[in-house]
Amino acid sequence: MMALETNIFPITNLHMLAAQYRSCRIRGLRKGQRQYYENCQYLQRKLSYRLRQPVTVTERSGEPYLVVPVDVGPMPVEYPLVLTKVQIEPLDEVFELDFASRDPDTDSLCVRFLHFAIQAPLWKNARLWQPQSGGPFYERQPAQTFRGIHLFSGFRL
Amino acid sequence: MFRQCQLQWFLKTKVANAKANDPFRREVSLLSKLQSLWAWRGYVVDQLLGTEITKALYYRHPIHLDNLLRKARTSFVLQADFARRHRIREPGMSPTKAGAAFAAWHAIEYVEPLTDADIKMAWRDVELALRNLCAMTELWDLLWAASRCIAQRPLQFESFGVKVKAIPDLIAFYADAPALIIDWKVHPKGSYSSRSQLALYALALARCQPHKDFPSPSRIGDPTELQLLEVQLLTGQQRFYCLSGEDIAAGEDFIAASADEMLLAGSDQSSHDLHVADFAIARSPEVCQRCVFRKLCWEMPHDGA
């Protein structure tokens, strides 16, 4: 059986990191709807993988908003979900994300942005492959080969 | 369907009724007839094979590709015209009244993009399926050797307190060999395996009360002895499957689990005693968007349910 190791790396330069993000209004999605939370999570996950950028859904005054990096590129105008098809309207206001300050509203944004920031160079690394978006990365060269079976070692963020 | 969306199953099996006084139930029945273009072109092939193959085998007439293509083209054009003009919405129209011309497309009802190129591609698939079928000489040898072939026959049996119905595409009976069940598939990559589907057909054939026109004696007692064949008409691949006792047990487990879930959902109750909120909805947006009942379902009060 393969051993699993967990490595924990503290990020020591949070005060030096900066990111700008924009909010987008999500029309057609509201609290109280059946599948509201599932739809929010689905939208967040699918758009993140499609755009290859950190995308998260937050709530402001009880209304869901999509939060994306300011340089995200073209966003879909609408997106199909369960029991609804939402319209996505980018708003003009741009916010500065402070990674050093702890705040329940921005912590989830920071984690998501950092997660993608760390993955980005891994996607470009020709020695690695990722069979599935959001899944583990594996080395292209097998760690072991026996009886015609290649064993690839990998890791997950 | 039940596992993908219980509410869809409820609407199709309990609510849909073309003859009901309730306009909602009539609308559900109408919507239940919608198909995607993809599903419809497979249906055109199934329909044609169901009639032409059994007729040819019964009367011992060889099948000619040109004849088959001509009949397919006639059906295709007739149904495509009916569907594009959305004649299902004409007052008084019904599948019975429309007869062989009947077809109804999801894309037309929901005003989704549908181009001439899409329809041409659908016809290309139909043509390819028929050409491939006519070229399968070994399969035809098998079919000609059968004493009787029956297409699209509903087989019913009872299991774990529920009635189970299966409709295999084709059953070929032999005097000196186990019966053969064939499942036609019209998938572009042919990667879909219908092993578990064929296992259920085998169970159904073995467990149902033999129909009057089943040859006697017919070797269908043990489902593991039946011959099962999946024919991928677009790729020309044929896959034979052998079932073991474990496969049959797995099939029965599946029926038992499904029966349990459906009974818990109220499958044995009248639609008057059931409510929309009693049923789980799809978890997948793709399933929800493709659903024929989308317009009714999205208007229902789901808030806080």
Image (cartoon, coloured by chain):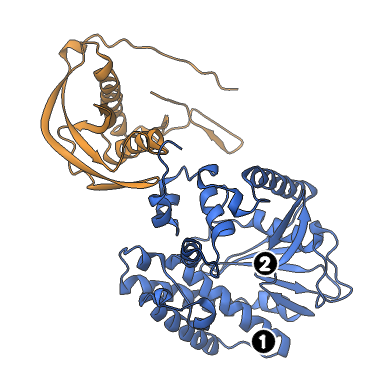
Would you name the residue on which mark 1 appears?
B56
- Relative image position of residue B224 (x, y in whole percent): 80, 56
Q: Is residue B135 visible to us here?
A: no
Which residue is found at the position 74% from the left and 73% from the top? B172
Could you say whether the residue bearing mark 1 is in a helix, strand or loop? helix
Which residue position is annotated with label 2? B168
Q: Quadrant of residue B182?
A: bottom right
Which chain is orange in the rendering?
A
Looking at the image, is B74 positioned above or below residue B159? below
Callout 2 and callout 1 share a chain: yes
Q: CA distance from mark 2 to mark 1?
A: 19 Å
Badge 2: residue crowd in 10 Å (few <14, some 14–19, many ≥20):
many
Work out whether residue A81 or residue B61 is closer to the camera in this orientation and state it.
A81
User: Is A102 placed above or below B220 here?
Assistant: above
The quarter of the picture where residue B86 lies is bottom left
Q: Residue at x 21, y 15 (%)?
A: A99
Residue type indicated by callout 2: Pro
According to the rendering, which colour does chain B have?
A: blue
As shown in the figure, which amino acid type bears the numbered disc 1?
Answer: Ala
